Image (cartoon, rainbow, N blue to C red):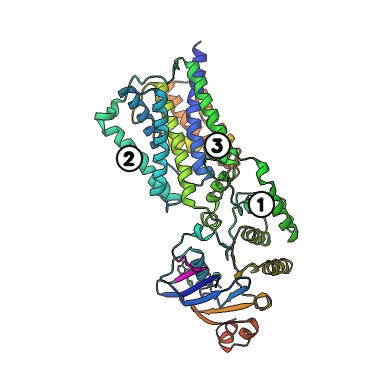
Amino acid sequence: MEIFNYFFHLGIIFSIYSLLVLSSNLSLGYGGLFNLALPGLALIGAYTSSLLSLKTNLPFGVIFVITLILGYLVGWIISKITNKLRGDYLALVTFGFTFIVFTLALNWESLTRGALGLPSIPKPKFLFFQIESLIEIFIFYYLITFIVYLFLQKLIFSPLGRSIQALRDDELAISVLGRNPLRIKSLVLGISGLLSSLAGILYAHYLSYLDPYSFGLGDLIFILSALFLGGLADNRGALLGTFLLIIIPESLRFLPLPSYLVGALRQIIYSLIIIIILWFRPKGIFGKIDLS
Amino acid sequence: MNLLELKKISKSFGGIKAVDEVSLEIEEGKIYSLIGPNGAGKTTLFNIISGFILPDEGKIIFRGEEITNFDIWQRASYLSRTFQLTRNFKNLNLKDNLLLSFDSPYENIFRFWQFKKKYEKEKIEIIKEFLNEIKFTREFSAKASEISYGQAKLLELTRAILKHHEILMLDEPVAGVNLEIREIIREILRKRRENGDTILLIEHDMNFVMDISDYVFVMSEGKLVAEGEPKIIKNNPKVLDSYLGAE
Ligand SMILES: Nc1ncnc2c1ncn2[C@@H]1O[C@H](COP(=O)(O)OP(=O)(O)OP(=O)(O)O)[C@@H](O)[C@H]1O
Ligand SMILES: [Mg+2]
């Protein structure tokens, strides 16, 4: 049964990272907002939910909701602070945000235990239903990812989604049509924050362990690569990109190679896929838009 | 009451006085043109009226209410405009580009999930009818980035017209378009006026301006140097001097 557990594990990782890639697709692919705060928001979600679970008696369902609201609020605040910034500057400030969250998690030892990390984070539990085994977690996480996917598709193909995409294409032109761009940005970054913190919750309560390195620069590269591979502004593409970037490097494990080679080879293959795809299909597999 | 009033509007960029104490009044139901040589400050004045730029001095009054410091999107509830360099939503198709003219009750985080395509049928009919009228034949699914220059101009114009407004501001609507499209635009604008619309347009094409306008403002070096009915403006020595002479 080892092999099944291994696939369930990969599946769970896929569902967690799908949330981050979908979240990034909403802000960057559809909203045109170069939001690099996602790992920071995921850390906030993961720490909030873990600490509340470890230090209070609140039921998990309540913690879950509080954490999601917090994720939305932090995304919303980021939108207020960065309102006038576009493109590179927004990327810089939101990347700075991720770095600040990381630094806090590392140095606020009385709360987070710093680099030692938080062990024994409990598994999710809703009302009386304790989600414990690998397969239960697998099903529960897929359900969540599926709901999020449906929600985002509905959003994107609604008039609200149309305005979000119009904001990406031309902020002034959408203002002239009577939409307040700040309102749209707040919404996009808020939802993006909520989804990232959701990914953080699922991650911490699956692995039962969390430290400041759980989400960082590596995840950012993964998210953006998956997005560009699958194609910006297409959620199916986002999922496919995530899937391929998990599966292809993973399959190296089964080659008869020494382990020190596998690590390096993984990075090389990883970069190679991206170069090849971007070479032959610069908009990604499903992508429709041009951000320049 | 005047629809729109500018009172001593001024705006400088560094040392350049792009707009210099411009005052003007616009009444409902007429076509106004704003003419003047390159760099006269016409587009800057448009940007001030629509809220892209705040003036250094002066007031903007709409139906008696001062709106000098309103945001762009707030003024949009009574003002439609196009741009000298056409702005469309390049990754969206023509249908979405035009549906954006209309507000939707579903454009809201609490209601978007109730949205169904049938709620837009009526708007799509309005759009199709208008496009027919102007003989615009590109398929709805074409992306805005794929259409020709003239079509892009028409698309932007259509969006501005279909959007609810009390004044329609067009920055060089016929610049660079072929004769056929120019005629189409002339016809649309005439029809709009017949229906009571108020139009303010910037244009370099004198024949077009003199033919279509009820009233003309002339700017030069930031100042409003003349105004009046087309036939008076045509023979105004100041205008010949500052504008037609410079051509
Ligand atoms: N954002 C800006 N920054 C600096 N200078 C500007 C800016 N916008 C306009 N100007 C200057 O203000 C003056 C008026 O420009 P404006 O674009 O309003 O002229 P215009 O009458 O529309 O000319 P054209 O017929 O060429 O479109 C010009 O000298 C221009 O260089
Ligand atoms: Mg101009």
Q: Is residue B162 above or below residue A31?
A: below
Q: Is mark 3 within 8 Å of ligand 1?
A: no
Distance from Cα at disc 1 to Cα at disc 3: 23 Å
Q: Is residue A89 above or below residue B9?
A: above
Are dots 2 and 3 in contact, CB under 8 Å? Answer: no
* Mark seen at residue B35: none
Q: Dot 1: what SS? A: helix
Tell me residue A158's x, y (percent): 59, 42
Q: Which residue is mark 2?
A: A100
Q: Chain of mark 1?
A: B
Discs 2/3, front? 3
Which residue ends up furthest to the bottom in the rendered image? B237
Q: Amino acid at mark 2?
A: Ile
Residue interval drawn in magenta: B59-69
Q: Chain of mark 3?
A: A
Which corner quadrant of the image does residue B164 belong to?
Answer: bottom right
Mark sitting earlier along the chain (2/3): 2
Which corner quadrant of the image does residue A229 belong to?
Answer: top right
Tell me residue A74's x, y (percent): 39, 40
Do callouts 1 and 3 point to residues on the same chain?
A: no
Q: Which residue is mark 1?
A: B94
Q: Amino acid at mark 3?
A: Leu
- Count neighbours of disc 1 (C-alpha within 10 A) and say few if under 14, some if 14 to 19, many if 20 or more: many
Question: Can residue A158 be seen from the camera position used here?
Answer: yes
Q: Is mark 2 within 8 Å of ligand 1?
A: no
Distance from Cα at disc 2 to Cα at disc 3: 29 Å
Whether residue A8 appears in magenta in the rendering, the answer is: no
Do callouts 2 and 1 point to residues on the same chain?
A: no
Q: Amino acid at mark 1?
A: Leu
Q: Dot 3: what SS? A: helix
Q: Which residue is mark 3?
A: A152
